[in-house]
């Protein structure tokens, strides 16, 4: 009976966190924004690549451009990180920790439920951004038709989806998990969101320009080994020319970092003053 009650508590906590996420307008905004940005970047990538394509190897170039179009979904890393911060700091922002913990009773269950929902949302967001990149690429071929026979058709774009999906999902989820753990360690929404934006679009590129060997071990730098960059162009270019880590190493490294941070956040959360 005790095991059964524990299972019910875990399932109840997960469902409660899922409902909170669904009612969070900021999360819906990020989901829609991720889709639209991926669509715009995907269409742009296909458009600018067409004039440079050689007609001698049309199929090879069409496949390469289709890959580049779909990899626009790597914008999910940015939106997953921001979503993780928003979802993890929601209780502190609304000052509802006391209510949540009184209903569930166990802090580990609450934190585990939040992590489960955030990771699930990062996966969903990855597929949503992949859909956006796909729609953007196909829409570009309709809005700006090209006589270049190397332009990828919709069937070519769809055929390349399996080649990029795992990398997009893995990179988005792992980067999102990293920032979720930091949000648990520092429960200040505005401060952490501001710090993330400065870090993502300023610090990462500065480090990449000065010390690329260090940049490749930043979470976003390691993620470039799994899927190419979209916004953080300097970190992608510099790590590519500074002996980037391999895909397997990057995946293991990011998983290890996220796991360690989760352990630290769990210990911190067990002693967290909910009245503060």
Image (cartoon, rainbow, N blue to C red):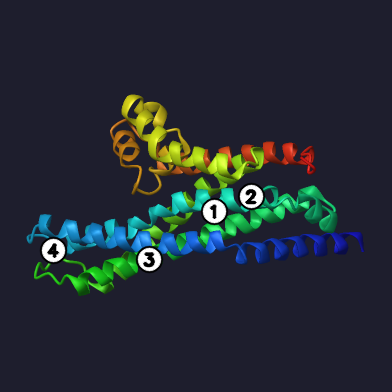
Distance of label 2 from label 1 (alpha carbons): 8 Å
Front disc: 1 or 3: 1
- The earlier-in-sequence mark between 1 and 3 is 1
Q: Would you name the residue on which mark 3 appears?
A: 132
Front disc: 4 or 2: 2
Q: For the point 46% across and 59% down, which residue is it?
A: 126
Q: Which mark is residue 181?
A: none
Query: Viewed as shown, does residue 230 lie left or right of 4?
Result: left
- The earlier-in-sequence mark between 3 and 2 is 2
Along the viewing direction, whichever of 84 and 156 lies nearer the viewer = 84
Query: Viewed as shown, does residue 248 lie left or right of 56?
Result: right
Q: For the point 37% across and 27% down, which residue is it?
A: 213
Query: Viewed as shown, does residue 124 lie left or right of 201?
Result: right
Tell me, yes or no, if residue 255 can be seen here: no
Distance of label 3 from label 2 (alpha carbons): 26 Å
Q: Helix, strand or loop at disc 1?
A: helix
Pointers 1 and 3 in contact (C-beta within 8 Å): no
**Quadrant of the drawing holding the N terminus:** bottom right
x and y percentages locating residue 161 in the rendered image: 36, 64
Q: Would you name the residue on which mark 4 appears?
A: 58
Q: Which mark is residue 88?
A: 2
**Quadrant of the drawing holding the C terminus:** top right
Q: Which mark is residue 83?
A: 1
Q: Residues within 10 Å of mark 4 (few under 14, many from 20)?
A: some
Q: For the point 42% across and 59% down, which residue is it?
A: 34
Pointers 3 and 4 in contact (C-beta within 8 Å): no
- The earlier-in-sequence mark between 4 and 2 is 4
């Amino acid at each position: 009976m005790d095991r059964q009650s524990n299972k019910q508590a875990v399932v109840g906590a997960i469902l409660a966190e899922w409902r909170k996420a669904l009612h969070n307008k900021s999360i819906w905004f990020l989901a829609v924004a991720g889709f639209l940005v991926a669509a715009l970047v995907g269409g742009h990538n296909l458009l600018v690549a067409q004039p440079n394509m050689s007609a001698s190897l049309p199929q090879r170039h069409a496949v390469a451009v289709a890959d580049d179009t779909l990899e626009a979904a790597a914008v999910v890393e940015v939106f997953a990180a921001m979503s993780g911060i928003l979802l993890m700091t929601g209780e502190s922002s609304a000052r509802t920790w006391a209510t949540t913990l009184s209903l569930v009773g166990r802090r580990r269950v609450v934190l585990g439920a939040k992590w489960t929902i955030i990771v699930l949302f990062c996966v969903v967001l990855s597929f949503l951004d992949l859909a956006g990149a796909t729609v953007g690429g196909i829409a570009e071929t309709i809005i700006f038709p090209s006589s270049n026979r190397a332009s990828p058709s919709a069937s070519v774009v769809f055929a390349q989806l399996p080649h990029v999906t795992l990398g997009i999902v893995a990179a988005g989820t792992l980067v999102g998990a990293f920032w979720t753990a930091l949000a648990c360690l520092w429960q200040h929404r505005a401060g952490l969101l501001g710090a993330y934006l400065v870090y993502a679009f300023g610090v990462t590129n500065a480090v990449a320009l000065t010390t690329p060997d260090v940049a490749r071990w930043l979470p976003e730098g390691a993620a470039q080994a799994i899927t190419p960059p979209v916004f953080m162009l300097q970190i992608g270019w510099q790590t590519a020319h500074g002996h980037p880590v391999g895909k397997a190493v990057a995946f293991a490294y990011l998983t290890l970092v996220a796991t360690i941070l989760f352990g630290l956040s769990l210990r911190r959360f067990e002693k967290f003053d909910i009245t503060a």
